[in-house]
Image (tube, rainbow, N blue to C red):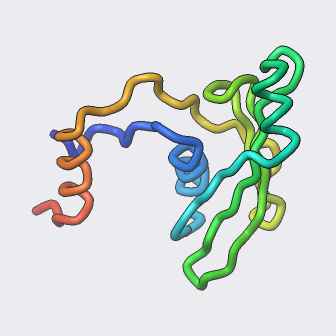
Amino acid sequence: MVALRPRPITSHADAIAFVLEQRGIAHERIVTAQVWPAAVNYYAYGPSVYPYSAAVSVTLPGGDVVPGSLECADDRRRCRVTIARLAIDREPIPDISATRPLPWMVWMQRLAEIVPVAR
């Protein structure tokens, strides 16, 4: 039953991975990081003045790192990702869930990903 449950979106990397998987783009790693001064402005003045923004780095299977950017209405909702080299331009990504999965659910999800399902 856990294998049938959709993977929870708990980070920007999860949300970006969802978009990449929908487009059939293989990837090994996704890293997001806020850069100065965007981080300072967002936390000092709030989302009504400065949107949340972050740099994105996607590592492809060959080891090539593709840069991109992320912009959100706040830090968890109404986000859009741009990765020009992958032909992704201001693509909406899923909102990040406010609830975290229980540790045993994370463990079961990981187990379901590595153990093949008998068909």
- Res 62 quadrant in image: bottom right
Which corner quadrant holds the N terminus? top left
**At which x and y percent is residue 109?**
24, 48
Seen from the viewer's position, the closer of residues 47 and 21 is: 47
In the image, residue 75 above or below residue 10: above
Residue 64 relative to residue 105: left or right: right
Q: Residue at x 79, y 20 (%)?
A: 47
Q: Residue furthest left?
A: 118
Residues 61 and 1: in front is: 61
Q: Is residue 79 above or below residue 14?
A: above
Residue extending farthest top:
48
- Closer to the camera, 4 or 113? 113
Q: Residue at x 75, y 64 (%)?
A: 86
Q: Position of residue 8 (x, y in %)?
A: 39, 37
Q: Is residue 64 above or below residue 108?
A: below
Percent x, y of residue 2: 19, 41
Q: Quick check: 61 above or below 31?
A: below
Please state if 19 lies on the left or on the right of 81 as rendered. left
Q: Residue at x 23, y 39 (%)?
A: 103
Query: Number of marks in the image?
Result: 0
- Give 39 or 19, whichever is nearer the viewer: 39
In the rendered image, residue 20, in percent from the top left (x then y), is placed at 60, 56
Residue drawn at point x = 24 percent, y = 33 percent: 102
Q: Quadrant of the C terminus?
A: bottom left
